[in-house]
Amino acid sequence: MPAISASAPGKIILFGEHAVVYGQPAIAVPVNQVRARAIISARPDQPSGWINVQAPDINLEDNLENIAQDHPLVLVIKGVLEATGIGQAPALTVRVTSTIPIAAGLGSGAAVSVAIARALSGFLGRPLMNEEVSNLAFEVEKLYHGTPSGIDNTVITYEKPIYFTKTGLTDQGKMDAFQVSQPFTIVIGDTGVPSPTVAAVGDVRRSWQEDEKTFQGLFANIGEIVTRAKDAIEKGEISTLGPLMNENQHLLEKIGVSSGKLEKLIQTAVQAGADGAKLSGGGRGGNMIALATQETAQQIANALIAAGATRTIITEVKQ
């Protein structure tokens, strides 16, 4: 039986992180420059049901039964077996690699889940549909991000820009059609500081519980920015996005999810020619993003590295 592989992209949130957990819309796009890949290989020399998991990026190689049963890789593999109705899989190896930085707000966990779900279900001869893949990845996300919005698994599964709204605290929400009428360039800068999504989401929830009125107002203001950004992107009015990014960042600072390192890189990007910049993802670390042009992108990236970013990615947002 030939090996089967599948890959999934990273992602960034352009507008709406954190507020999206509370029913406000958000815009997210795939980042194809970084990807997670899963390769499933048959092991006819081993007995049926034998599954070996190899994840060199996290120094993991062991048989499935020996790994903590709440480990995300175990949960995804078992989820696929259940979803495909396979009681006992043929002996196989699951090898996962990724160029997506871990804990950086680029959706590394969801991308790994999506890649495994696609490759393993295909190997078993019962490929899962997009909705099934997304749902499976979301279930794993819930265990590791507290109350995730569902946006990571959705944009990574469908690999296209999405306008996303969460419909409930435990539901992953809905994806609406979203037209990018004119491509635009984003520079991503990594602070090199892990972004503790679970902690950030939990802290925001506690702050919201303590002062619901104030935080509902902040979330509503972010939602308005997202709506204006969607309208601008659909009309091709890209110059409007920079000031909206700046507004969104100001509100994220009020929510308490920014950091000195993020703000330094954001300021650096603007001084280097970006039309606007903000953090992307959980915050407290991870990545920031800056709106650039094809002409200014590299100089912004160079400035970010000089200011302490550990890596940069230049990506084009398009349909």
Image (cartoon, helix red, strand yellow):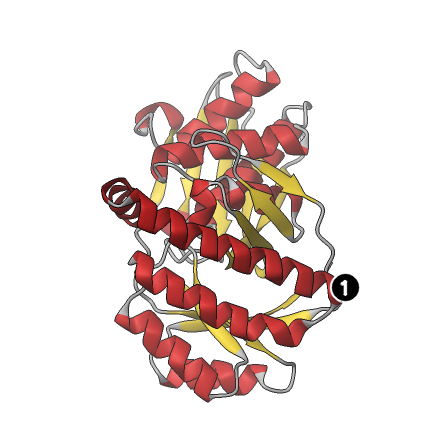
Left or right: where 142 falls relative to 285: right
Secondary structure at numbered mark 1 = loop
Which residue is located at x 34 percent, y 37 percent?
Answer: 146
Which of the two residues, 141 or 275, is positioned nearer the viewer here?
275
Report x, y in % for residue 63.
38, 29
Which residue is located at x 48 percent, y 28 percent?
Answer: 77
Question: Is 284 located above or below residue 152 in the figure?
Answer: below
Report x, y in % for residue 196.
30, 51
Report x, y in % for residue 42.
58, 29
Q: Which residue is mark 1?
A: 181
Check disc 1 and give the amino acid type.
Answer: Ser
- Quarter holding the C terminus is bottom right
Question: Is 77 located above or below residue 28 in the figure?
Answer: above
Which of the two residues, 129 or 99, is positioned nearer the viewer here?
129
Farthest residue, direction top: 87
Which residue is located at x 52 percent, y 87 percent?
Answer: 273
